[in-house]
Structures are given as structure tokens and as C-alpha cells.
Amino acid sequence: MEPMTVVSPDRYEEALCCLVGRRRTTLMKSMMEQLTAAGRLPEGCLRAVLAVDGGFLAVSYMAVAPGRTVTITLSPARGRAGAERCEMLLTDSCAALVDWQVDLAQTLLGPGDAVMLDVYLRSGFTHLADLQTMTLAVRRSGKRKPMPAGVTLCAATDDVLPPILDETYIGTQDCPGLHGLRRTEDIVAGHRAGGCVVPELWQTILLDSVPVGCVLMTCGADKVADLAYIGLCPDARGKGIGIAVLSHMMGRLSAKGVRMLRLAVDASNVPARKVYHRMGFRHSNTQRAVIRSTRRMQVEPASGQDVHMTSTPRRSCGG
């Protein structure tokens, strides 16, 4: 068996070159400097399979994000031997997460990358969903749908969001396999980390003054905003509220100078995709999301009981 090691900081640039399949260039050096400055290269984040001469045969990079998640990226697998090395390295990297404060490991693959998908699945990951990225140009003079009677919006704060989100997850068709894998408070933290949060774009949806959902948008670079989340409680669905709220929010985006709204939707979530198509969103990319719960690794040694429970009882789907 070829030896595995934690990459030492003096070899980070070499490991990153192996990870992305590039030779050492000014671009690679700049990328490493940016990752270092952002605190994205902590000790132990890079692991590798070594060749006899000490070179890197395979590399994994573990990037922790707010919301107790970690994205594990592998260098490309070339041939059967390369796939076996990647599988061995991914298993080793996941085992190391017992000492990390994370509840969910994840990655995104190309829709045609069958080799790497097999590597992740053989290492204990599951295929969560095929995520379709969709975009819509924000027009200043676009026609907005009127809000249904009784529907209003108000600021969504972190103290009121968790119970609202929990209700919107009931019966959800958008990545139901995520349900119960993280605390709702951590999900909120993950949404916040997606970009700049502007109060006017982080809203609770009210029906007759009762919270029935939320719409969360973040602003990024190049005047592009992301729809981090929109969801409604079961009783509020099918009333045209979602599309009206999105139409209203397009006006707010326009006022902020945003030119493009971007979102990712589960390809199997047909109702949501129909709404987005009706609004004019266009499919631009598809990625395959695979996940592995690491909560089972985070145990209380004395009792062996899971110490990172979700904020609400488990349901059959949603969240």
C-alpha cells in the first residue's frame, strides 16, 4: 500500500498543483497566497498519497465553511490505480474529520464524471441531487406580479428564522436527503456565508401577519445576487405566493444595482423548476452533489451518543 501523509506547509503549492492538474505557475502561486490570506489553508487541510520518490500521486483538500460543513476535493483519478488511490485517500480524509467540528462533508462533481462519482460512493458518500444552476437578468423596468392578498414581508433575523425554516422543510422536494444532517442554526450560518447579506433581501414571508416562509438572497461580486433559499410552509403552497415574492424581490435587486440573479435547484424538484422557467430563468450549468454525514463521528467518548442533534425532531423529508 502506498503511504499517505498530511502535507506540510512547505509543500502546499506543489500539492495544490496536483489537486487542480496544473504545473507551478504565477497563477498557482497567486491562488495559494489568496487561500492563505483567507485562512483557507489550516494545518491538516491537505492530505496526499506519496510515490516512491516522495512525489504526490493523489491529493485531497478539505475546506471548512460556516454551518459546520466541509468540502472535500480530490485530484483527478487517472486509470484504475488512480481511482483506487483517490478512494483510499478520501476514506483517510473522512476518518480525520473525527477531530474537526463539522457535521456534513460534501463535494460537487461534473454530471459526466462517472469515475469520481464512483470513488465518492465507494467511500461512503451518497448522491444527494443533480443541481441545476439557473440565471435571470434583473431588469429595471420589468413587470412585477402583485402580492396576493394578505402577503407581506418583514426582516428575517437569525432568532426567528430556524422555526420558519423547519416548517418550510416539511415535504420539500429540494434536496430532501439533507434533512436532519445539520442543525437549523448551522444552515442559517451557511446561507449567510454565501455572500453579503443585505437586510432588504433577507426577508420573512407573512400571510395575514403569520410567518409562512422566507426568502434569503445574498449579494456577490460583479453585481450578481444568489437566491440562497426560498421556502413556504405546506399550507401556504400552491397560492402563487412564491412567484409573487420572487417578482417583488426582483424590484429590490434592481434598486440595489444587481444585474443578475442566480440560483441552484434540485433537478428533481419539478414544481420549483416550472416556476423559475415561467419567470424567465435559464439553465446554465449542472453539477452532481454528493454528501456524507460526519455527525456519527462526533460522539461523546464516555457515552457513545451523538452530541450534535438537529434543532427539531427528524421528519421523513425536508431540510
Image (cartoon, rainbow, N blue to C red):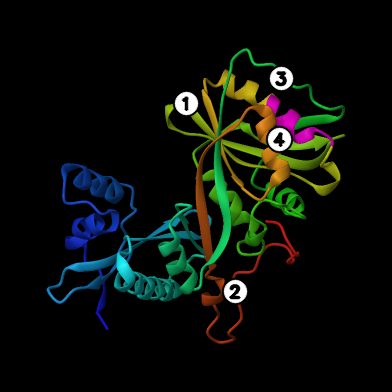
| Residue 155 visible (yes or no) | no
Mark 1–mark 2 CB contact (< 8 Å): no
- Mark 4 lies on a secondary structure that is helix
Horizontal arrangement in the rendering, residue 6 relative to residue 310 (left or right): left
Which corner quadrant holds the N terminus?
Answer: bottom left
Q: Nearer the viewer, residue 43 or 62?
A: 62
x and y percent of residue 120 in the render?
46, 67
Graded by Cα atoms within 10 Å as few (under 14), some (14 to 19) or many (20 or more), the crowding at tag 2 reads few
- What residue does disc 4 label? 275
x and y percent of residue 136 in the render?
57, 28
- What residue does disc 3 label? 144
Quote the CA–CA distance across marks 3 and 1. 20 Å
22 relative to 194, above or below: below
Give whichever of discs 3 and 1 has the lower sequence position: 3
Mark 4–mark 2 CB contact (< 8 Å): no
- What residue does disc 2 label? 307
Give whichever of discs 4 and 2 has the lower sequence position: 4
- The residue type indicated by label 2 comes to Val
Q: Which residues are magenta?
A: 239-247
Q: Nearer the viewer, mark 1 or mark 4?
A: 4
- What residue does disc 1 label? 223
Give whichever of discs 1 and 4 has the lower sequence position: 1
Q: Is residue 253 magenta-colored?
A: no
- The residue type indicated by label 3 comes to Arg
Q: Nearer the viewer, residue 35 or 238?
A: 238
| Residue 81 visible (yes or no) | yes
x and y percent of residue 182 in the render?
60, 62
Q: Nearer the viewer, mark 1 or mark 2?
A: 1
- The residue type indicated by label 4 comes to Val
Horizontal arrangement in the rendering, residue 155 relative to residue 91 (left or right): right
- Chief secondary structure of the magenta span? helix
